[in-house]
Amino acid sequence: MTHNMIGKILQGRYQIVQTLGAGVFGQTYIAMDVEQPTNAKCVVKQLKVTSCQPSYLQTLRLHFLTETETLRHLGHHQQIPQLIACFEEHERFYLVQEFIEGYPLTAELPINQRLGYLWSESEVIDLLRDVLEILDFIHSQGVIHCDIKPENLIRRTDDGKLVLIDFGSIQPVDFAVDDVLPIYRVPATSLGYIPPEQFIGQTQPNSDIYSLGMVAIQALTGLSPLQLKIDPYTNEIIWRSPTTPVSDYLAAMLTQMIRYDYQQRFHSAAEVLRVIQQMSMDNWRPQTIPTQYSVIPNSPTSHQNSTPKRHKKLSPALTGMRVGLAANSLLLGFGVYSVLNSAPAYSETETLYKATKEFQSGDLEQAIALAKSIPTHSHVYPEVQATIEEWQNQWQLAAEQFNLAQKFADEGKWSEVLQSSAQVPDILYWQSKTDQLVERAKINIDIETKNLLRKAYDKAREKDFTTALNYLQQIPPESNAGAIVQQKITEYEQKQQVRSVFLLQNAYNKAASRDFAAASQYLQQIPKNSSVYATAQNKLREYTNKQGVAKQNQTEESLTSERQITPSTSAFIKSHTSTSLKSFDPGNYMREVNIQ
Protein backbone atom coordinates (compact mmCIF):
# COMPACT_ATOMS: atom_id res chain seq x y z
CA MET A 1 0.00 0.00 0.00
CA THR A 2 2.99 2.28 0.52
CA HIS A 3 3.70 2.88 -3.15
CA ASN A 4 0.04 3.67 -3.88
CA MET A 5 0.11 6.62 -1.49
CA ILE A 6 2.96 8.50 -3.16
CA GLY A 7 1.54 11.51 -4.98
CA LYS A 8 -1.89 11.30 -3.34
CA ILE A 9 -3.40 14.42 -1.83
CA LEU A 10 -5.27 14.01 1.46
CA GLN A 11 -7.97 16.45 2.47
CA GLY A 12 -7.18 18.30 -0.74
CA ARG A 13 -4.11 19.69 0.99
CA TYR A 14 -1.41 17.20 2.07
CA GLN A 15 0.40 15.60 -0.86
CA ILE A 16 2.37 12.46 0.02
CA VAL A 17 5.90 12.67 -1.39
CA GLN A 18 7.92 10.10 0.53
CA THR A 19 7.60 7.11 2.86
CA LEU A 20 9.20 7.89 6.20
CA GLY A 21 8.50 4.72 8.14
CA ALA A 22 6.44 1.58 7.96
CA GLY A 23 5.22 -0.65 10.74
CA VAL A 24 2.93 -3.60 11.16
CA PHE A 25 0.16 -1.30 12.30
CA GLY A 26 0.55 1.83 10.25
CA GLN A 27 2.50 3.99 7.84
CA THR A 28 4.32 7.30 8.21
CA TYR A 29 4.95 9.64 5.30
CA ILE A 30 6.47 13.00 4.47
CA ALA A 31 3.96 15.28 2.78
CA MET A 32 3.89 18.76 1.31
CA ASP A 33 1.23 21.23 2.41
CA VAL A 34 0.11 22.48 -1.00
CA GLU A 35 -1.92 25.29 0.57
CA GLN A 36 1.22 26.86 1.99
CA PRO A 37 3.09 29.20 -0.37
CA THR A 38 6.36 27.49 0.55
CA ASN A 39 4.87 23.96 0.27
CA ALA A 40 6.00 23.31 3.82
CA LYS A 41 6.91 19.75 4.77
CA CYS A 42 4.89 17.85 7.34
CA VAL A 43 4.59 14.31 8.63
CA VAL A 44 1.45 12.27 7.96
CA LYS A 45 0.68 9.18 10.03
CA GLN A 46 -1.88 6.75 8.71
CA LEU A 47 -3.31 4.35 11.26
CA LYS A 48 -3.99 0.87 10.01
CA VAL A 49 -7.57 -0.30 10.45
CA THR A 50 -7.80 -4.05 11.11
CA SER A 51 -11.56 -4.35 10.79
CA CYS A 52 -14.39 -2.68 8.93
CA GLN A 53 -17.01 -3.57 11.51
CA PRO A 54 -19.03 -0.45 12.40
CA SER A 55 -18.66 -1.07 16.14
CA TYR A 56 -14.87 -1.35 15.82
CA LEU A 57 -14.65 1.79 13.69
CA GLN A 58 -16.81 3.71 16.14
CA THR A 59 -14.61 2.66 19.06
CA LEU A 60 -11.48 3.53 17.09
CA ARG A 61 -12.97 6.88 16.11
CA LEU A 62 -13.77 7.74 19.72
CA HIS A 63 -10.31 6.94 20.99
CA PHE A 64 -8.70 8.65 18.00
CA LEU A 65 -10.52 11.92 18.71
CA THR A 66 -9.81 11.69 22.44
CA GLU A 67 -6.11 11.05 22.13
CA THR A 68 -5.48 13.57 19.36
CA GLU A 69 -6.54 16.22 21.85
CA THR A 70 -3.81 14.95 24.17
CA LEU A 71 -1.27 15.12 21.37
CA ARG A 72 -2.47 18.57 20.37
CA HIS A 73 -1.80 19.80 23.90
CA LEU A 74 1.59 18.08 24.10
CA GLY A 75 2.58 19.78 20.85
CA HIS A 76 2.50 23.12 22.67
CA HIS A 77 5.93 22.22 24.06
CA GLN A 78 8.68 23.66 21.88
CA GLN A 79 10.57 20.35 21.78
CA ILE A 80 7.65 18.15 20.73
CA PRO A 81 6.31 18.16 17.15
CA GLN A 82 3.09 20.12 16.86
CA LEU A 83 -0.08 18.36 15.84
CA ILE A 84 -1.24 20.24 12.75
CA ALA A 85 -4.37 18.30 11.86
CA CYS A 86 -6.24 15.06 12.38
CA PHE A 87 -8.95 13.70 10.13
CA GLU A 88 -10.75 10.63 8.84
CA GLU A 89 -10.91 9.89 5.14
CA HIS A 90 -12.40 6.76 3.55
CA GLU A 91 -12.51 5.09 6.97
CA ARG A 92 -8.80 5.74 7.47
CA PHE A 93 -7.48 7.87 10.30
CA TYR A 94 -4.67 10.36 9.75
CA LEU A 95 -2.50 12.63 11.87
CA VAL A 96 -0.51 15.52 10.44
CA GLN A 97 2.43 16.67 12.52
CA GLU A 98 5.22 19.17 12.26
CA PHE A 99 8.28 18.02 10.31
CA ILE A 100 11.50 18.51 12.28
CA GLU A 101 14.55 19.49 10.25
CA GLY A 102 17.56 17.85 11.87
CA TYR A 103 19.27 14.54 12.49
CA PRO A 104 18.85 11.77 15.09
CA LEU A 105 21.04 11.58 18.17
CA THR A 106 22.52 8.34 16.80
CA ALA A 107 24.68 10.52 14.53
CA GLU A 108 26.40 12.00 17.59
CA LEU A 109 26.83 8.89 19.74
CA PRO A 110 30.02 6.82 19.55
CA ILE A 111 29.73 3.58 17.57
CA ASN A 112 31.86 1.71 20.09
CA GLN A 113 34.71 2.38 22.50
CA ARG A 114 37.19 2.71 19.62
CA LEU A 115 35.09 4.43 17.00
CA GLY A 116 33.49 7.79 17.67
CA TYR A 117 33.77 10.56 20.17
CA LEU A 118 33.08 9.72 23.83
CA TRP A 119 31.05 12.49 25.41
CA SER A 120 32.32 14.58 28.28
CA GLU A 121 30.40 14.78 31.55
CA SER A 122 29.30 18.34 30.81
CA GLU A 123 27.85 17.24 27.47
CA VAL A 124 26.01 14.36 29.13
CA ILE A 125 24.56 16.71 31.75
CA ASP A 126 23.34 19.01 28.97
CA LEU A 127 21.71 16.02 27.26
CA LEU A 128 20.00 14.93 30.47
CA ARG A 129 18.74 18.40 31.28
CA ASP A 130 17.41 18.91 27.75
CA VAL A 131 15.45 15.64 27.62
CA LEU A 132 14.36 15.63 31.28
CA GLU A 133 12.59 18.95 30.80
CA ILE A 134 10.58 17.38 27.96
CA LEU A 135 9.79 14.29 30.04
CA ASP A 136 8.76 16.40 33.01
CA PHE A 137 6.20 18.15 30.81
CA ILE A 138 4.94 14.90 29.23
CA HIS A 139 4.59 13.12 32.56
CA SER A 140 2.73 16.06 34.04
CA GLN A 141 0.12 15.60 31.30
CA GLY A 142 -0.45 11.95 32.21
CA VAL A 143 1.53 10.47 29.32
CA ILE A 144 4.55 8.18 29.30
CA HIS A 145 6.63 8.05 26.13
CA CYS A 146 7.89 4.45 26.54
CA ASP A 147 10.35 4.51 23.65
CA ILE A 148 13.15 6.88 24.60
CA LYS A 149 16.11 5.98 22.40
CA PRO A 150 18.64 7.85 20.22
CA GLU A 151 16.55 7.44 17.05
CA ASN A 152 13.65 9.25 18.67
CA LEU A 153 15.70 12.27 19.74
CA ILE A 154 16.21 14.67 16.85
CA ARG A 155 18.82 17.42 17.03
CA ARG A 156 16.95 20.33 15.51
CA THR A 157 19.01 22.19 12.92
CA ASP A 158 18.00 25.76 13.65
CA ASP A 159 18.69 25.86 17.41
CA GLY A 160 20.49 22.61 18.29
CA LYS A 161 17.77 21.56 20.74
CA LEU A 162 16.66 17.94 21.06
CA VAL A 163 13.12 17.21 19.92
CA LEU A 164 11.30 14.09 21.08
CA ILE A 165 9.62 12.12 18.29
CA ASP A 166 8.83 8.51 17.50
CA PHE A 167 7.97 8.29 13.83
CA GLY A 168 8.99 4.64 13.67
CA SER A 169 7.18 3.39 16.79
CA ILE A 170 3.65 2.87 15.51
CA GLN A 171 1.97 0.13 17.54
CA PRO A 172 -1.36 -1.77 17.39
CA VAL A 173 -4.64 0.12 17.45
CA ASP A 174 -5.98 -2.02 20.26
CA PHE A 175 -7.69 -0.53 23.27
CA ALA A 176 -8.19 -3.68 25.33
CA VAL A 177 -6.68 -3.62 28.81
CA ASP A 178 -5.25 -7.15 28.88
CA ASP A 179 -2.35 -6.73 26.50
CA VAL A 180 1.32 -6.98 27.31
CA LEU A 181 4.08 -5.52 25.14
CA PRO A 182 5.13 -8.45 22.87
CA ILE A 183 8.90 -8.73 22.71
CA TYR A 184 8.98 -9.85 19.10
CA ARG A 185 7.15 -6.66 18.10
CA VAL A 186 9.67 -4.42 19.81
CA PRO A 187 12.07 -2.83 17.28
CA ALA A 188 15.58 -4.16 17.75
CA THR A 189 16.79 -0.58 18.18
CA SER A 190 14.60 -0.28 21.28
CA LEU A 191 15.90 -3.37 23.06
CA GLY A 192 18.17 -2.45 25.93
CA TYR A 193 16.61 0.97 26.33
CA ILE A 194 13.25 -0.44 27.47
CA PRO A 195 13.18 -1.30 31.20
CA PRO A 196 12.07 -4.75 32.43
CA GLU A 197 8.76 -3.65 33.94
CA GLN A 198 7.56 -2.34 30.60
CA PHE A 199 7.40 -5.87 29.17
CA ILE A 200 4.87 -6.96 31.78
CA GLY A 201 2.59 -3.96 31.57
CA GLN A 202 3.82 -2.20 34.70
CA THR A 203 5.12 0.88 32.95
CA GLN A 204 5.88 3.83 35.22
CA PRO A 205 6.84 7.45 34.57
CA ASN A 206 10.39 6.56 35.61
CA SER A 207 10.49 3.91 32.87
CA ASP A 208 11.37 6.84 30.62
CA ILE A 209 14.08 7.86 33.10
CA TYR A 210 15.62 4.39 32.80
CA SER A 211 15.73 4.70 29.00
CA LEU A 212 17.30 8.15 29.14
CA GLY A 213 19.91 6.89 31.60
CA MET A 214 20.90 4.16 29.13
CA VAL A 215 21.32 6.76 26.38
CA ALA A 216 23.56 8.86 28.65
CA ILE A 217 25.68 5.82 29.58
CA GLN A 218 26.10 5.00 25.91
CA ALA A 219 27.37 8.53 25.29
CA LEU A 220 29.89 8.21 28.12
CA THR A 221 31.14 4.68 27.45
CA GLY A 222 30.63 4.05 23.74
CA LEU A 223 28.74 0.85 24.61
CA SER A 224 25.17 0.20 23.51
CA PRO A 225 22.80 -1.06 26.22
CA LEU A 226 22.91 -4.67 25.00
CA GLN A 227 26.72 -4.66 25.21
CA LEU A 228 26.63 -3.98 28.95
CA LYS A 229 26.92 -6.83 31.43
CA ILE A 230 24.31 -7.62 34.08
CA ASP A 231 25.00 -8.71 37.64
CA PRO A 232 23.49 -12.23 37.83
CA TYR A 233 22.58 -11.79 41.52
CA THR A 234 21.06 -8.32 41.54
CA ASN A 235 20.08 -7.92 37.85
CA GLU A 236 21.69 -4.47 38.00
CA ILE A 237 23.56 -3.25 34.93
CA ILE A 238 27.35 -3.10 35.29
CA TRP A 239 28.40 -0.13 33.22
CA ARG A 240 31.17 1.64 35.12
CA SER A 241 34.74 0.38 34.86
CA PRO A 242 38.09 1.76 36.07
CA THR A 243 38.67 3.13 32.57
CA THR A 244 35.35 5.00 32.45
CA PRO A 245 36.14 8.72 32.86
CA VAL A 246 33.22 9.74 35.04
CA SER A 247 32.98 11.32 38.46
CA ASP A 248 31.40 9.40 41.31
CA TYR A 249 28.57 11.91 41.66
CA LEU A 250 27.41 11.61 38.05
CA ALA A 251 28.00 7.84 38.08
CA ALA A 252 25.79 7.46 41.14
CA MET A 253 23.05 9.54 39.54
CA LEU A 254 23.09 7.50 36.34
CA THR A 255 23.13 4.24 38.30
CA GLN A 256 20.04 5.31 40.18
CA MET A 257 18.32 6.22 36.91
CA ILE A 258 18.74 2.65 35.61
CA ARG A 259 17.92 0.59 38.71
CA TYR A 260 16.39 -2.79 37.84
CA ASP A 261 13.57 -2.22 40.34
CA TYR A 262 11.67 0.90 39.31
CA GLN A 263 10.80 1.60 42.94
CA GLN A 264 14.50 2.23 43.61
CA ARG A 265 14.90 4.72 40.78
CA PHE A 266 14.23 8.42 40.79
CA HIS A 267 10.47 8.79 40.91
CA SER A 268 10.17 11.64 38.43
CA ALA A 269 12.04 13.67 35.85
CA ALA A 270 11.68 16.72 38.10
CA GLU A 271 13.56 14.87 40.82
CA VAL A 272 16.53 14.18 38.55
CA LEU A 273 16.52 17.81 37.44
CA ARG A 274 16.72 18.87 41.08
CA VAL A 275 19.77 16.66 41.56
CA ILE A 276 21.43 18.20 38.51
CA GLN A 277 20.63 21.66 39.82
CA GLN A 278 22.08 20.73 43.22
CA MET A 279 25.24 19.53 41.50
CA SER A 280 25.63 22.96 39.93
CA MET A 281 24.96 24.71 43.26
CA ASP A 282 27.61 22.54 44.90
CA ASN A 283 30.10 23.73 42.26
CA TRP A 284 30.33 20.21 40.91
CA ARG A 285 33.21 19.60 38.55
CA PRO A 286 33.56 16.71 36.11
CA GLN A 287 36.30 14.90 38.01
CA THR A 288 36.54 11.77 40.12
CA ILE A 289 35.51 12.12 43.76
CA PRO A 290 37.23 9.71 46.18
CA THR A 291 34.07 8.73 48.05
CA GLN A 292 31.99 6.01 46.37
CA TYR A 293 28.22 6.32 46.44
CA SER A 294 25.78 3.55 45.69
CA VAL A 295 22.98 6.13 45.49
CA ILE A 296 22.80 9.89 45.45
CA PRO A 297 23.15 11.26 49.00
CA ASN A 298 19.74 12.17 50.41
CA SER A 299 18.05 10.46 47.47
CA PRO A 300 14.68 8.74 47.67
CA THR A 301 16.39 5.34 47.79
CA SER A 302 19.00 6.19 50.41
CA HIS A 303 19.28 3.43 52.99
CA GLN A 304 19.66 6.03 55.73
CA ASN A 305 16.06 7.14 55.11
CA SER A 306 17.15 10.72 55.54
CA THR A 307 15.12 11.95 52.61
CA PRO A 308 12.32 14.36 53.47
CA LYS A 309 8.89 12.82 53.00
CA ARG A 310 7.94 15.30 50.33
CA HIS A 311 10.64 13.75 48.10
CA LYS A 312 9.04 10.34 48.42
CA LYS A 313 5.70 11.47 47.09
CA LEU A 314 4.80 11.78 43.46
CA SER A 315 3.26 15.00 42.31
CA PRO A 316 -0.56 14.96 42.14
CA ALA A 317 -0.40 15.00 38.34
CA LEU A 318 1.64 11.77 38.37
CA THR A 319 -0.21 9.98 41.18
CA GLY A 320 -2.55 7.34 39.78
CA MET A 321 -1.52 8.17 36.23
CA ARG A 322 -3.86 6.37 33.87
CA VAL A 323 -1.48 5.37 31.13
CA GLY A 324 -4.12 3.01 29.76
CA LEU A 325 -6.34 5.99 28.95
CA ALA A 326 -3.64 7.19 26.59
CA ALA A 327 -2.90 3.76 25.17
CA ASN A 328 -3.10 4.74 21.56
CA SER A 329 -0.79 7.68 22.08
CA LEU A 330 1.85 5.09 21.29
CA LEU A 331 0.57 4.67 17.79
CA LEU A 332 -0.29 8.33 17.51
CA GLY A 333 3.15 9.46 18.45
CA PHE A 334 4.08 8.83 22.07
CA GLY A 335 4.49 5.10 22.60
CA VAL A 336 2.21 4.71 25.60
CA TYR A 337 1.43 1.25 26.94
CA SER A 338 -1.35 0.31 29.33
CA VAL A 339 -0.53 -0.28 32.99
CA LEU A 340 -4.10 -1.35 33.71
CA ASN A 341 -3.75 -4.75 32.09
CA SER A 342 -3.90 -8.18 33.62
CA ALA A 343 -0.23 -9.10 33.18
CA PRO A 344 0.93 -12.71 33.13
CA ALA A 345 3.17 -14.06 35.83
CA TYR A 346 6.32 -12.02 36.17
CA SER A 347 8.57 -15.08 36.02
CA GLU A 348 7.24 -16.09 32.60
CA THR A 349 7.71 -12.72 30.97
CA GLU A 350 11.08 -12.37 32.68
CA THR A 351 12.05 -15.73 31.20
CA LEU A 352 11.12 -14.49 27.75
CA TYR A 353 13.03 -11.28 28.38
CA LYS A 354 16.12 -13.26 29.42
CA ALA A 355 15.70 -15.47 26.37
CA THR A 356 15.78 -12.34 24.24
CA LYS A 357 19.06 -11.35 25.91
CA GLU A 358 20.49 -14.78 25.05
CA PHE A 359 19.30 -14.40 21.48
CA GLN A 360 20.95 -11.00 21.14
CA SER A 361 24.19 -12.26 22.68
CA GLY A 362 24.42 -15.11 20.14
CA ASP A 363 23.10 -18.23 21.85
CA LEU A 364 20.09 -19.08 19.72
CA GLU A 365 19.69 -22.58 21.12
CA GLN A 366 19.68 -21.37 24.71
CA ALA A 367 17.25 -18.59 23.81
CA ILE A 368 14.83 -21.05 22.22
CA ALA A 369 15.25 -23.47 25.12
CA LEU A 370 14.39 -20.74 27.61
CA ALA A 371 11.40 -19.62 25.56
CA LYS A 372 10.12 -23.19 25.23
CA SER A 373 10.35 -23.66 28.99
CA ILE A 374 7.34 -21.35 29.32
CA PRO A 375 4.27 -23.58 29.83
CA THR A 376 1.54 -23.80 27.20
CA HIS A 377 -1.09 -22.46 29.59
CA SER A 378 0.84 -19.20 30.05
CA HIS A 379 -0.69 -15.97 28.80
CA VAL A 380 2.49 -15.30 26.86
CA TYR A 381 2.64 -18.72 25.20
CA PRO A 382 1.27 -17.46 21.82
CA GLU A 383 3.86 -14.71 21.95
CA VAL A 384 6.55 -17.32 22.64
CA GLN A 385 5.67 -19.23 19.47
CA ALA A 386 5.73 -16.08 17.34
CA THR A 387 8.98 -14.99 18.95
CA ILE A 388 10.76 -18.31 18.30
CA GLU A 389 9.69 -18.29 14.66
CA GLU A 390 10.84 -14.70 14.25
CA TRP A 391 14.18 -15.49 15.90
CA GLN A 392 14.80 -18.43 13.57
CA ASN A 393 13.97 -16.40 10.46
CA GLN A 394 16.10 -13.46 11.55
CA TRP A 395 18.99 -15.71 12.52
CA GLN A 396 18.99 -17.47 9.16
CA LEU A 397 18.88 -14.17 7.29
CA ALA A 398 21.69 -12.76 9.44
CA ALA A 399 23.89 -15.81 8.80
CA GLU A 400 23.28 -15.64 5.03
CA GLN A 401 24.03 -11.95 4.76
CA PHE A 402 27.09 -12.18 6.99
CA ASN A 403 28.52 -15.07 4.95
CA LEU A 404 27.88 -13.10 1.77
CA ALA A 405 29.64 -10.07 3.25
CA GLN A 406 32.55 -12.32 4.29
CA LYS A 407 32.78 -13.70 0.73
CA PHE A 408 32.89 -10.19 -0.73
CA ALA A 409 35.58 -9.23 1.79
CA ASP A 410 37.71 -12.19 0.70
CA GLU A 411 37.32 -11.02 -2.90
CA GLY A 412 38.16 -7.42 -2.02
CA LYS A 413 34.73 -6.14 -3.10
CA TRP A 414 34.39 -3.61 -0.35
CA SER A 415 31.31 -1.77 -1.57
CA GLU A 416 29.47 -5.07 -1.75
CA VAL A 417 30.63 -5.80 1.81
CA LEU A 418 28.86 -2.67 3.05
CA GLN A 419 25.73 -3.43 1.04
CA SER A 420 25.47 -6.98 2.39
CA SER A 421 26.26 -5.86 5.94
CA ALA A 422 23.41 -3.38 5.81
CA GLN A 423 21.04 -6.29 5.24
CA VAL A 424 22.09 -8.09 8.43
CA PRO A 425 19.21 -7.92 10.95
CA ASP A 426 19.80 -5.93 14.11
CA ILE A 427 21.01 -8.82 16.26
CA LEU A 428 23.86 -7.81 18.53
CA TYR A 429 25.83 -11.03 18.00
CA TRP A 430 25.76 -10.75 14.22
CA GLN A 431 26.18 -6.99 14.24
CA SER A 432 29.38 -7.30 16.28
CA LYS A 433 30.74 -9.79 13.71
CA THR A 434 29.59 -7.61 10.84
CA ASP A 435 31.11 -4.48 12.39
CA GLN A 436 34.59 -5.96 11.91
CA LEU A 437 33.95 -6.48 8.19
CA VAL A 438 32.43 -3.02 7.88
CA GLU A 439 35.46 -1.47 9.55
CA ARG A 440 37.81 -3.31 7.15
CA ALA A 441 35.65 -2.28 4.20
CA LYS A 442 35.67 1.38 5.21
CA ILE A 443 39.45 1.37 5.66
CA ASN A 444 40.00 -0.21 2.23
CA ILE A 445 37.45 2.05 0.57
CA ASP A 446 39.25 5.02 2.10
CA ILE A 447 42.60 3.79 0.70
CA GLU A 448 41.04 3.12 -2.71
CA THR A 449 39.39 6.53 -2.69
CA LYS A 450 42.65 8.33 -1.94
CA ASN A 451 44.44 6.49 -4.76
CA LEU A 452 41.71 7.26 -7.28
CA LEU A 453 41.56 10.90 -6.21
CA ARG A 454 45.32 11.21 -6.58
CA LYS A 455 45.16 9.74 -10.10
CA ALA A 456 42.27 12.02 -10.99
CA TYR A 457 44.18 15.09 -9.78
CA ASP A 458 47.25 14.05 -11.80
CA LYS A 459 45.23 13.66 -14.99
CA ALA A 460 43.43 16.94 -14.39
CA ARG A 461 46.80 18.70 -14.15
CA GLU A 462 47.61 17.20 -17.55
CA LYS A 463 44.25 18.57 -18.79
CA ASP A 464 43.07 15.01 -19.44
CA PHE A 465 39.70 15.58 -17.84
CA THR A 466 38.12 12.55 -19.50
CA THR A 467 40.46 10.14 -17.72
CA ALA A 468 40.21 12.18 -14.52
CA LEU A 469 36.43 11.84 -14.59
CA ASN A 470 36.76 8.12 -15.23
CA TYR A 471 38.84 7.78 -12.04
CA LEU A 472 36.35 9.82 -10.03
CA GLN A 473 33.44 7.69 -11.23
CA GLN A 474 35.24 4.58 -9.95
CA ILE A 475 35.21 5.89 -6.38
CA PRO A 476 32.68 3.84 -4.34
CA PRO A 477 29.52 5.75 -3.42
CA GLU A 478 30.05 4.61 0.20
CA SER A 479 33.23 6.67 0.40
CA ASN A 480 33.43 9.49 2.93
CA ALA A 481 34.78 11.69 0.14
CA GLY A 482 31.40 11.80 -1.60
CA ALA A 483 31.05 15.57 -1.33
CA ILE A 484 34.56 16.18 -2.73
CA VAL A 485 33.99 13.67 -5.52
CA GLN A 486 30.76 15.33 -6.64
CA GLN A 487 32.40 18.73 -6.48
CA LYS A 488 35.32 17.57 -8.62
CA ILE A 489 33.07 15.78 -11.10
CA THR A 490 31.14 19.00 -11.64
CA GLU A 491 34.36 21.00 -11.94
CA TYR A 492 36.03 18.58 -14.37
CA GLU A 493 32.91 18.25 -16.52
CA GLN A 494 32.86 22.02 -16.94
CA LYS A 495 36.56 22.11 -17.75
CA GLN A 496 36.11 19.19 -20.14
CA GLN A 497 33.50 21.20 -22.05
CA VAL A 498 35.79 24.22 -22.23
CA ARG A 499 38.69 22.07 -23.44
CA SER A 500 36.45 20.39 -26.04
CA VAL A 501 35.58 23.78 -27.52
CA PHE A 502 39.27 24.68 -27.44
CA LEU A 503 40.19 21.48 -29.34
CA LEU A 504 37.45 22.11 -31.91
CA GLN A 505 38.74 25.63 -32.55
CA ASN A 506 42.28 24.31 -33.00
CA ALA A 507 40.92 21.81 -35.51
CA TYR A 508 39.26 24.65 -37.45
CA ASN A 509 42.53 26.59 -37.45
CA LYS A 510 44.51 23.63 -38.78
CA ALA A 511 41.91 22.90 -41.45
CA ALA A 512 42.05 26.51 -42.58
CA SER A 513 45.74 26.04 -43.30
CA ARG A 514 44.96 22.74 -45.15
CA ASP A 515 46.53 20.63 -42.37
CA PHE A 516 43.72 18.10 -42.17
CA ALA A 517 45.80 15.47 -40.41
CA ALA A 518 46.50 17.78 -37.46
CA ALA A 519 42.86 18.94 -37.48
CA SER A 520 41.71 15.31 -37.27
CA GLN A 521 44.03 14.65 -34.32
CA TYR A 522 42.43 17.50 -32.39
CA LEU A 523 38.93 16.27 -33.21
CA GLN A 524 39.73 12.73 -32.07
CA GLN A 525 40.54 14.06 -28.56
CA ILE A 526 37.02 15.43 -28.03
CA PRO A 527 35.13 13.05 -25.67
CA LYS A 528 31.69 11.59 -26.39
CA ASN A 529 29.96 13.36 -23.52
CA SER A 530 31.05 16.75 -24.80
CA SER A 531 28.42 19.16 -26.08
CA VAL A 532 30.43 19.62 -29.32
CA TYR A 533 31.04 15.91 -29.88
CA ALA A 534 28.49 15.61 -32.73
CA THR A 535 29.99 18.63 -34.51
CA ALA A 536 33.47 17.19 -34.02
CA GLN A 537 32.46 13.87 -35.58
CA ASN A 538 30.93 15.57 -38.64
CA LYS A 539 34.07 17.64 -39.15
CA LEU A 540 36.25 14.58 -38.59
CA ARG A 541 34.53 12.78 -41.48
CA GLU A 542 34.76 15.90 -43.64
CA TYR A 543 38.44 16.46 -42.90
CA THR A 544 39.28 12.80 -43.38
CA ASN A 545 37.73 12.91 -46.87
CA LYS A 546 39.50 16.14 -47.73
CA GLN A 547 42.73 14.75 -46.39
CA GLY A 548 42.33 11.85 -48.86
CA VAL A 549 41.56 14.22 -51.72
CA ALA A 550 44.62 16.29 -50.88
CA LYS A 551 46.80 13.19 -50.92
CA GLN A 552 45.32 12.15 -54.26
CA ASN A 553 45.97 15.61 -55.70
CA GLN A 554 49.54 15.49 -54.47
CA THR A 555 49.99 12.10 -56.14
CA GLU A 556 48.55 13.34 -59.46
CA GLU A 557 50.75 16.46 -59.37
CA SER A 558 53.78 14.28 -58.69
CA LEU A 559 52.99 12.07 -61.67
CA THR A 560 52.52 15.09 -63.95
CA SER A 561 55.84 16.50 -62.88
CA GLU A 562 57.59 13.20 -63.54
CA ARG A 563 56.12 12.91 -67.07
CA GLN A 564 57.27 16.40 -67.92
CA ILE A 565 60.77 15.49 -66.84
CA THR A 566 60.74 12.03 -68.50
CA PRO A 567 58.74 12.15 -71.80
CA SER A 568 59.07 8.39 -72.35
CA THR A 569 56.69 7.77 -69.55
CA SER A 570 53.86 9.40 -71.47
CA ALA A 571 53.38 6.18 -73.27
CA PHE A 572 52.06 4.72 -70.01
CA ILE A 573 48.84 6.72 -70.50
CA LYS A 574 46.77 5.34 -73.31
CA SER A 575 45.24 7.77 -75.75
CA HIS A 576 41.83 6.28 -75.09
CA THR A 577 42.02 6.71 -71.25
CA SER A 578 38.79 8.29 -69.96
CA THR A 579 40.72 10.63 -67.67
CA SER A 580 43.55 12.49 -69.21
CA LEU A 581 46.07 14.65 -67.39
CA LYS A 582 45.12 17.59 -69.53
CA SER A 583 41.54 17.49 -68.31
CA PHE A 584 42.51 16.93 -64.62
CA ASP A 585 42.19 20.15 -62.61
CA PRO A 586 43.30 19.82 -58.95
CA GLY A 587 41.60 23.09 -58.25
CA ASN A 588 38.23 21.44 -58.72
CA TYR A 589 38.91 19.30 -55.66
CA MET A 590 40.59 21.94 -53.52
CA ARG A 591 37.67 24.30 -53.86
CA GLU A 592 35.64 21.80 -51.86
CA VAL A 593 37.59 22.82 -48.80
CA ASN A 594 35.14 25.04 -46.95
CA ILE A 595 36.02 25.92 -43.35
CA GLN A 596 32.89 27.01 -41.55
Image (cartoon, rainbow, N blue to C red):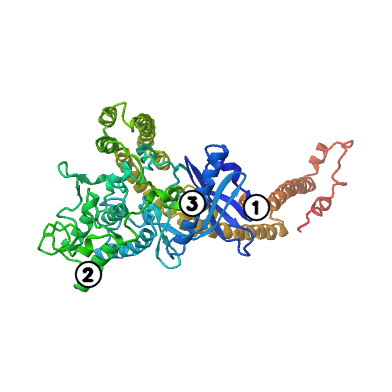
Instruction: Residue 472: give its label.
Output: 3
Q: How far apart are marks 3 and 1 (CA)?
A: 24 Å
Which one is in front, 170 or 248?
A: 170
Amino acid type for the residue under numbered disc 2: Gln
Image quadrant where residue 406 sits: top left
User: What SS does tag 3 mark?
Assistant: helix
Residue 18, compared with residue 287, is above or below; it is above
Q: Which of marks 2 and 3 is in front?
A: 2
Instruction: Residue 278: give its label.
Output: 2
Q: Residues within 10 Å of mark 1 (few under 14, many from 20)?
A: many
The residue that disc 1 covers is: 523
Q: Position of residue 342 (x, y in %)?
A: 34, 39
Which one is in front, 52 or 383?
A: 52
Q: How far apart are marks 2 and 1 (CA)?
A: 78 Å
- Is 435 left, or right, of 311 in this rendering? right
Amino acid type for the residue under numbered disc 3: Leu
Q: Where is residue 434 in the image (x, y as percent from the top left)?
A: 33, 40
Q: Position of residue 537 (x, y in %)?
A: 69, 49
User: What SS does tag 1 mark?
Assistant: helix
Q: Quick one: label 2 or label 3, which is nearer the N terminus? A: 2
